[in-house]
Image: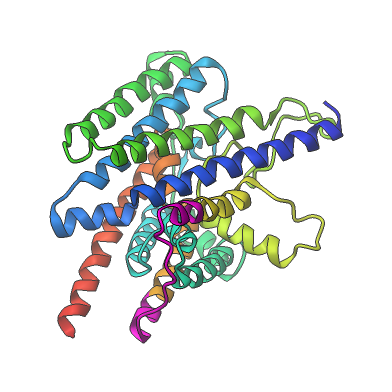
Amino acid sequence: MDLAGIQTLQTTVLWAAFAASCLFGFIAQRTQFCTMGAVSDIVNMGSWTRMRMWGMAVGVAMIGFYGMGWLGWIDTGKTIYSSGRIIWLSALVGGLLFGFGMVLASGCGSKTLVRIGAGSLKSLVVFFVMGFFAFATLRGVFAVLRVNTVDKVAVDIAAGGSVPMWLTQFFGFAPDVSGLVAALLVGGALMFWALLGRDFRTPDGLLAGVGLGAVIAWMWWISGHLGFVPEHPETLESVYLATNSGRMESLTFTAPMAYLLDWLIFYSDTSKALTLGVVTVVGVVVGSFVQSLLSRSFRWEGFRDTQDTALHLAGAACMGVGGVTAMGCTVGQGLSGLSTLSLTSAIAVTGIMIGAVLGFRFQIWLLERE
């Protein structure tokens, strides 16, 4: 493939990613899919319906990811989640910060983008603040702090950082077989648990769980199969086109918010190229906007008062720092990361859930003070 062919393929990859993220935003807006909302429903009402949506989505994405690996469409070991270095403290601390922040900011990164598409101006403010703090944690002042503190605490696992790698190491299974077996067992259990809920078995519930899980798997295919070039004509090395990490990627929204701001600010710099992360951030907003127009639910929304503004700003800052530190958000480490059966992702999601519960407790404390 020559350079012209590479450029054409990269454009195709970006458009495909944009379409996938539009579908994500459309479904999330239609079904009110929200990780923070799922935790809130459990804490405040004892309802597990939206958490079952989340569980179904993880199960579908997991089986899709390792199913494609078994078919030979993608190399499941070429993701940022497959490293044998488990930065458990970064995942835990970052997850705690992100979970606490998403409660203060009325939603995680994906929900922020969905709400922007539905007319929320305060979510637009959250986006800019979150993107700023994410960039500062990627390359700025908080990056120095992160690298010199929590990132130094890690455990190296020779067998690898995911369940299928352990099966391969200890039982001698072929990697593709290990992945498929683990995905069918864990992902199948999650899907079965989700279907046990009668309230979940509705058109919207199934659309959220199956649809969003399929979108995550689709993104893995776009990045890992469609966008994979075995030998780049300039470097003669294999490459995953239009990725920021240089590896196969699926949906995640914290670092990509920073990448979008960077691309917008330095647009005239020809070295700033569009990536999967940038186009998917825009795609979620567009998809949500279309759905909100079709359902006539588009409404302009602003901050209620000074306290509401302060809480959202603080929450956005926590999400920006926490999401980068944990290497992902509720979608990046949650749906995408867990679909690879990564131990680091499991730790990060645990931190996010604990942080969210602490965030709700903090909100209750504020209400009691009033």
Image check: 193 left or right of 310?
left
Image check: 209 left or right of 280?
left
Q: What residue is at 62 percent from the left and 37 percent from the top?
A: 16
Pick the residue in front: 63 or 202. Answer: 202
User: Is residue 330 among the parts visible in the rendering?
Assistant: no
The quarter of the displayed image where residue 248 is located: top right
- Is residue 154 located in the magenta-colored stretch of the structure? no
Looking at the image, is 136 positioned above or below residue 75?
Answer: below
User: Is residue 20 among the parts visible in the rendering?
Assistant: yes
Give x and y (percent) for residue 366.
22, 79
Looking at the image, is 108 positioned above or below residue 279?
Answer: below
Pick the residue in front: 180 or 346. Answer: 180
Residue range (magenta): 288-311
Give x and y (percent) for residue 119.
46, 66
Looking at the image, is 327 positioned above or below residue 54?
Answer: below
Q: Quadrant of the N terminus?
A: top right
- Is residue 310 located in the magenta-colored stretch of the structure? yes
Q: Quadrant of the C terminus?
A: bottom left
Q: What residue is at 51 percent from the left and 21 percent from the top?
A: 69
Q: What residue is at 67 percent from the left and 37 percent from the top?
A: 13
Pick the residue in front: 94 or 61. Answer: 61
Give x and y (percent) for residue 316.
44, 69
Pick the residue in front: 36 or 145. Answer: 36
Image check: 41 left or right of 125?
left
